[in-house]
Amino acid sequence: MKILNKYLLVYVLCLLFFALSGQEKSIEQIIIGSPNAKSTTYELSGLVQDLTTQEPIIGANITVIGEESKGTSTDVSGIFSIVLPNGESDLKIEVLGYKAKLINVKIYEDGAIRVNMIQSSIELEQVTIKGKSSRDNIESVISGLEQINIAELKQMSRLMGELDVLRSIQSLSGVTSTGDGASGFNVRGGNADENLILQDDALILNPSHTLGFFSLFHPDLVGSVNLYKGDQPASLGGRLSSVLDVKLREGNNEEYKFNGGIGLASSRLTFEGPIKKQKGSFIVGGRISYMDWILNQIKNINVQRSKAFFYDLTVKADSRLTDKTKVGFTAFLSADEFNFADEVNFEYETRTVTGYVNHLFSDQWSLNFILNIGDYNSSLFDIQGNDVSKFTNKVSYIRPNIKSLYQLDDTKRITIGAEINIFDISPGDIAPEGTMSTVLPQSLPNERAAAISPNIQYEWDIDPTFSLSLGLRYTTYNRIGAGEFFTYAEGAPKQERTVTDILTFGDGESIAKYSSFEPRLSIRKNITDDASIKASFNKSYQYLNQISNTSSSTPIDIWQLSDYHIAPQVAYNYSLGWFQNFKDGAVQSSIQAFYRQQPDIIEYKDFADLLLNENIERELVNGEGQAYGVELNYKREMERSNLQVNYTYSRSLRRVVENDEQNAINNGDWYASNFDKPHSLNLRYSKKIARMSELSVNFTYSTGRPLTVPISNFTVDNIRNIPIYSNRNEFRIPDYHRLDVSYSIGPFGKNLDKWESTLIFSVFNLYGRDNAYSVFFRQQPSRSVQALRIATLGAAFPSVTYNFKF
Amino acid sequence: MKNIFIPALFFLLMMCSSCIEEIDLNIDTDQSFVVIDGLIGDELQEYVVRVNTSAIIGVGNDNILNPISGANVYVVSDSGEKMEFIEDPEELGAYKAVTQAKVGSSYSVEVNLPDGSKIISTPTEVLQKVPLQEVDFFVTADGEINSSGNFVTLEYVNVFLNTTFDDNDRPFLRWRAEGIYEFQEVYPMAFNPRKCYINDNIDINNIQIFDGTLLNGVELFDQPVFRTRMNRRFNVIYCAHVTQYRISEQEFDYWANVDQLTNIDGTLFDPPPATIRGNLTNTTDPSVNVQGYFSVVSLSSKRIFIDVQREGFFAETDCTSFTFRPNPPECADCTTIQRSTLEKPDYWPF
């Protein structure tokens, strides 16, 4: 109680001080860790962003009051990092056009905070606890924005002891996946390829390691995670469903530090330090897996003969060249290898480099230039029999992006930018391996395209209770030759027999041009001090699609550019939400409804042959899609515990009405998409049990995904038991549910300055639910057809991780 | 340390595993469909059109046929010729005729069901025959991991064929194979040992098709027809009869889809399954799903006798005259083997 009284006293005195000083500045109090910590210094990372738009703020200055020489500034991602002494410090955060913010920080362990800056005309009169404003959900103009900070990430489910951004994303309302081991995620009924995934502004095409069991993002480097489910800022685009924007934190700019973890499946290590004290820093982090011994424990000969391996390496450096100019880069390399039973071998890797220059021209104007270069390579090796071969495909991209922020006055802000996306895709090469292979080499011609997307965003706080955000993105897209395309008879299905002509395009010649206006609109109106209503609308186009007709996307799925035959996909997204807080923000709740209309989607014919197909348009059919649903969120923060519950009801439907009866799906009726999961419930509870230990419990439930099942079978000639299937996705696999627990103890160490460690025990799928990874059907002699379930994690999956820092 | 104990106990008690198990999806499967399975070719011989209904999932055993008796079945040519197929009273649902199709003409089947509905197939032309030039075999000894996880060496007989195409006429082909082997009873189990000839179901669920448009050149070499374990069936002599059908592109797609559908691995990466569409339509109600295929082909065939000793191998018999090891019952009475007969085929070499 003495400590509590001391905090209260400090808090009251601070309030009194600022009240008497007459400054129109808000104060926030943040407590990180427990006062019994032993280290003398700790690292504080943070994300500084605009309260209403949630856009990161570049170039905000952070200084320690009373020690003005000590300070830092936010990078292009709005992220900063500073070392503070054990105990209490006062930070001042200043940036042009915003109210200066004072934060009283009591720091007893390394931590991260999120700082919401308000424009000069808006008052914020509340105290933020634990680094995140309890009014964010009310004040932010963007509906459908989900934010995860590091503290929340640590409370999420752990598979094999690994913190995982993607698994955390999947526990949010409106987000689902097709099952354990599925790559990617689905947002509000959208396909996995309809999510734009960025890591420090670098495009990530496959966010998964080990076919989806782990995510690509190094948990010790993640600074912030934003998921835009509904409205998206105009500066981001090119996908129909969502934007997942992951920002990495900066390195420590005062001292060198190591931290890492040793787990059952993988280990990780991070090294960071100053390039020049308080002027620049670097951080290098890597992970490596060694999970073959786990596969050997699984009682299945094929799994025992399988191998899984991945590693990733991230290097990030930032430097303030002058008071007004900051530069930096992030380089990322990730590689995976997965061998199944010495039969098939997958390999895939992601390589990206992003550099940025940020300059403040004046108090009102800043300019930010980002260049992202990267590629994604995947290979499939057939390593048995006469078909020994290697199939490869590759996507390369160059993405320059320029963004200028201009503060018109205290209530109006404008952001103007332009993004260029240049893609060069090698859609598939197959080559025989060895002298005995009977496979003929084949190579599909490269595909190239360039898209230029100028964009503008205007934000206006009409009054303190009413905000408006208007955005417009215009994209002009050009698919470039060389290439050859067949033309088909008007109105007829695209088949070899309906070919009318062949068009030949030379190198660099334009094959197809498309342009699109993509308006964005968000409004927020506060109804009371504790309630607001938000609405948004956006129209999005997608020019790069993943061609896959499997239930889950795979590492070797081909990325296909819009071309002469394949028009860009378009979606109209609408959302409406009511956000309500209780008990001064300790309880936050919301209800959001959404509707998406997709007038032209890509669907696949039955038995579509997509691999190395030069005329892939013949395998596709035109359809329409719609998704709708309601999301309910409840979050309660207490002194020693947190509770978060969300429930989503959503539908994702498709319809294909074709003139050709053979290609109409389900007789032209609406049917469930592969990822339609109407009910989804997530519950997370964490509680500090003792001085050094914390228990987290996560429960998740969702409706089983749709399934096409055999309803009868027959014999023709010498082939027995040919199944007759139901309508597409007429049935469902059993529902998915899972309970995970995690128990952390620490930090340990006699002298935490030199060595600090924690132990984390976790059990994934505590009650051993046999959740179906897949359901398939098998015919055996003298037996009727069987439905078989593969449960990848059909038992409780315990793990222990040892984390250290020095 | 108390805080560590409970989670550590969990760790020790829990085991990692994955499993494949049978589940009940509680699906109402009370649906069956008309299935027509037939063929007509350019050789004069008996052809069969089978009319059945499909089997209900979860009821009965493998390969259940539910014949539809009393149908009127005709094969109709584009020249107006109408050949009637008569139901075999010994085999209900099987409609037979000895006939021959003409190269260059188109044929379709017409089935009038007892309920009054009529089913017809898409007319298909009989294309020029592609001669089957050579059928041969070789024996391989392959190392494999058996179900117990042990490395074993197993011997296989591989039958293959060679054929040549016309450069300007790239066919779609399908091959079927029949096998017959000789089995001899032994003394003293049988007082007067006899020889049986057993019809071997060698290519059940074996789909062998080829798209001639993909061949680099005009000669198809070492095209596998079937592969089977070398065991007692090859102790004396084994006769393989390979038939080559020249089929339409539509039929090729049909068998390719059947092959894909019957070989689904069951992973998330499999394409979604779907019902195969053949070339049959219910003209009374086109929305009614009719399954099966009526095949119109030109055909050629070759027969080879396989003696594995030619390749330096020897296949042991299960029957021995002087041993304490018990002999299987067929060593005393070879007619107990399924699909066996004492009647020697007229083409048998000795």
Image: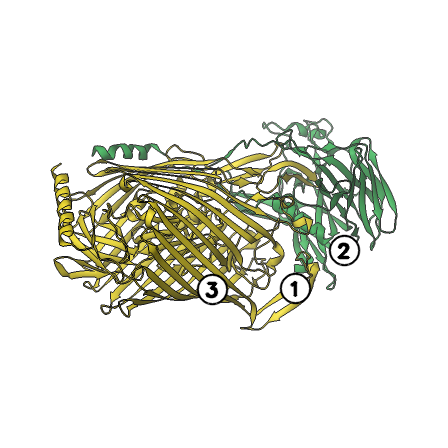
Q: How far from the left and from the top, in percent, is residue A632?
A: 40, 40
- Contact check, label 1 and label 2, Cβ < 8 Å: no
Instruction: Chain letter for mark 3, please.
Output: A
Q: How far from the left and from the top, in percent, is residue A338?
A: 44, 50
| Mark 3 burial class by Cα count in 10 Å: few <14, some 14-19, many 20+ | many
The chain whose colour is yellow is A
Q: Is residue A619 left or right of residue B40?
A: left
Q: Colour of chain B?
A: green
Q: Amino acid at mark 3?
A: Tyr
Q: Which residue is mark 1?
A: A487
Q: How far from the left and from the top, in percent, is residue A677?
A: 49, 41
Q: Secondary structure at mark 1?
A: strand
Q: Quadrant of residue A181?
A: top left
Instruction: Chain letter for mark 2, please.
Output: B
Q: Is residue A115 left or right of residue B252?
A: left
Among the two numbered marks 1 and 3 on one chain, the one whose residue lies closer to the N terminus? 3
Disc number for residue B131: 2
